[in-house]
Image: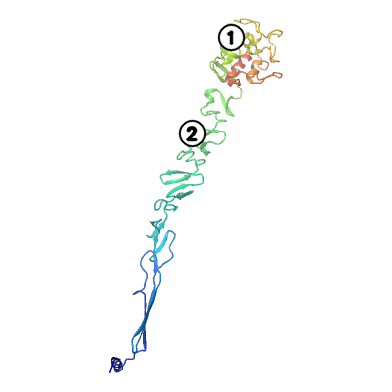
Amino acid sequence: MNRSSVAALFVAAIGCTASPAATTTGSGAASGGTSAGARSISAGGTTGGTTSAGGSASGTTGGTTGAAVCEPACDTNESCVAGICQCVTSANSCPIGDGGLLCVNEKSDHFNCGTCNNVCPPQANCDDGGCECQGGTSGCETVNGLICVDERSDPNNCGSCGHFCSASGQTCSDGGCVCPPGEMACGEQAVCIAVGNDPLNCGSCGNDCAINLPNSGCKKGVCICGISYGFCAVTASPPTCQCELHGCSAVPGFATDIYPLLSQQTGAFGCAASGCHGGAVPAGSLAFRDSAGDLDAGMAYAELLGLDGGASSAGTPACDAGISEGAPSTQCACVSLVVPDSTSESYLIDVLLGQLPTGCAGNLDMPIDSDGGWAKLDSCSLQLVEQWVEYGANP
């Protein structure tokens, strides 16, 4: 009896029944499951085989192994390696709130620029690992990090980082701190003040009308006398003025007050005595120096009033021929330049005010500066001359 017959008898003897064939199926691995890690991993495969019972044993073994897959899919800056999401070579891993890690590109990530958790401010992009402000803004470092500001209009960073527009009411315009129109930043506290009507800062910071023009107020940036007060010259060197009740108390004289002013050798109109009103043919036949080149107040006084001499005159005025003494200013040549007690008829006042009578040719406004332009007298100096004429044009 061969071994097959013995085996059959053995099976029958113990009451077992053998199936004609048996098939075993198993996974490609010994067991299947999910790996531990940041992401779930699916791995699978089968190995199949069949063993037949018969006169001879024969079988076939076959199998299929599946590729590892990352589930869920990897994020940007990650790649799936052996079923695990890993940062790509150009990225770095940064911790996140739930204890995990996030792959970021620190060269371009807005929230992790250059290093983990370095968040770029609004209006900035992350460029090559650094926050770069965009849209015409500039980067300024603060205790809280970088901020992007427009230095053209930011009152806290006006023109440059940290330059604060400190004056109350100031705004930043074109990179400079400015007060509203008609106002200037004045005083130690740098407050914007309407200088058009502030008597302590009239027209400019620190121009105190009470000091510079007693009994006056401020109107349109100029200290002016109040109702019932007159604007009066008080002294001549230098000219000072104040507001006075019931007319001006000072009575200027030509030699002591007016001549030194008009015959200046230096200053805005220093050419008066040395050029314009000097030499053989002085302008307007008014000379401040005699034929010897010496200053002569008496001669100038006689020429201004059209007199045939004066207290110390060296001669008669050249343009007096045919004109009566005290003739009003009705023409531009050979006139009495001053009419005592009348500023409206005095040609001297016309040229000082820049209000030439009808018929005058050319630009004769006086005095003129070294460039030939009009160097208008300040209001107090002009008041001194007018006051001299109004009070009789005393010598």
- Please name the residue shown 67% across and 19% down the image: 362
Q: Residues within 10 Å of mark 2 (few under 14, many from 20)?
A: some
The residue closer to the viewer here, 337 or 238, is 337
Identify the amino acid type marked 1: Arg
- Please name the residue shown 63% across and 8% down the image: 302
Q: Which label number is shown at residue 190?
A: 2
Can the viewer see residue 251?
no
**Residue 379 placed where, x, y %?**
59, 21
Among the 4 quarters of the image, the one containing residue 242: top right
Question: How far apart are the two marked residues, 2 and 1, measured between alpha carbons?
Answer: 51 Å
Compared with residue 345, is residue 85 higher up or lower down, i.e. above or below? below
**Residue 251 placed where, x, y %?**
59, 13
Mark 1, residue position: 289
Would residue 44 appear left or right of 380 to someone viewing this image? left
The residue closer to the viewer here, 243 or 202, is 202
Among the 4 quarters of the image, the one containing residue 226: top right
The disc, 2 or 1, on the residue closer to the chain's N-terminal end is: 2
* Marks 2, 1: nearer the viewer: 1
The residue closer to the viewer here, 7 or 108, is 7
Compared with residue 17, is residue 326 higher up or lower down, i.e. above or below? above
Name the element at disc 1.
loop
Identify the amino acid type marked 2: Ala
**Residue 395 placed where, x, y %?**
60, 9
